[in-house]
Image: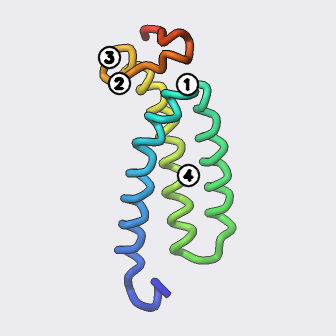
Amino acid sequence: MFETQHFIGLATGLITFLIIGAFHPLVIKCHYYYGTKCWWWFLVLGLISCAASIYVGSLFWSTVLGVLAFSSFWTIGEVFEQEKRVAKGWFPANPKRNGGQHRKS
């Protein structure tokens, strides 16, 4: 549909914007509840998305899966950066996890 109507660029841009926008609060929430232990979830999501991107026949969906894959890989680093932001007091620590204490890096 998108290929024939020449909207693939706009659709890809919109989906990329939504994926990146969704990952920002996801990093904050995952870190708040699970700390840095959740990094491997994003690794698995990235690897699955990479593999799916190779096997999907549609250029549009292959591109979307590629964006999802590399956004997931980027998020791994952001989870560890979030740990530093919490230690600096920029974001609240979860008092129910580790007594609210986070290691200073």
How many angstroms separate mark 4 from mark 3 (CA)? 30 Å
Residue 82 vs 25, above or below: the answer is above
Helix, strand, or loop for circle 4?
helix
Residue 62: image location, x then y, percent: 57, 68
Residue 76 vs 3, above or below: the answer is above
How many angstroms separate mark 1 from mark 4 (CA)? 19 Å
Residue behind mark 4: 69
Residue 34 vs 68, above or below: the answer is above
Q: Nearer the viewer, mark 4 or mark 2?
A: 2
Residue 16: image location, x then y, percent: 41, 60
Of all residues shown, which one is farthest toward the bottom?
4
Near mark 3 (Cα within 10 A), the count class, few <14, some 14-19 or many ≥20, is few
2 and 3 marks in contact (CB < 8 Å): yes
**Which quadrant, please, contains the C terminus?**
top left
Q: In the rendered structure, which disc, 4 or 3, sits on the residue that comes first in sequence?
A: 4
Helix, strand, or loop for circle 1?
helix
Near mark 2 (Cα within 10 A), the count class, few <14, some 14-19 or many ≥20, is some
Residue behind mark 3: 89
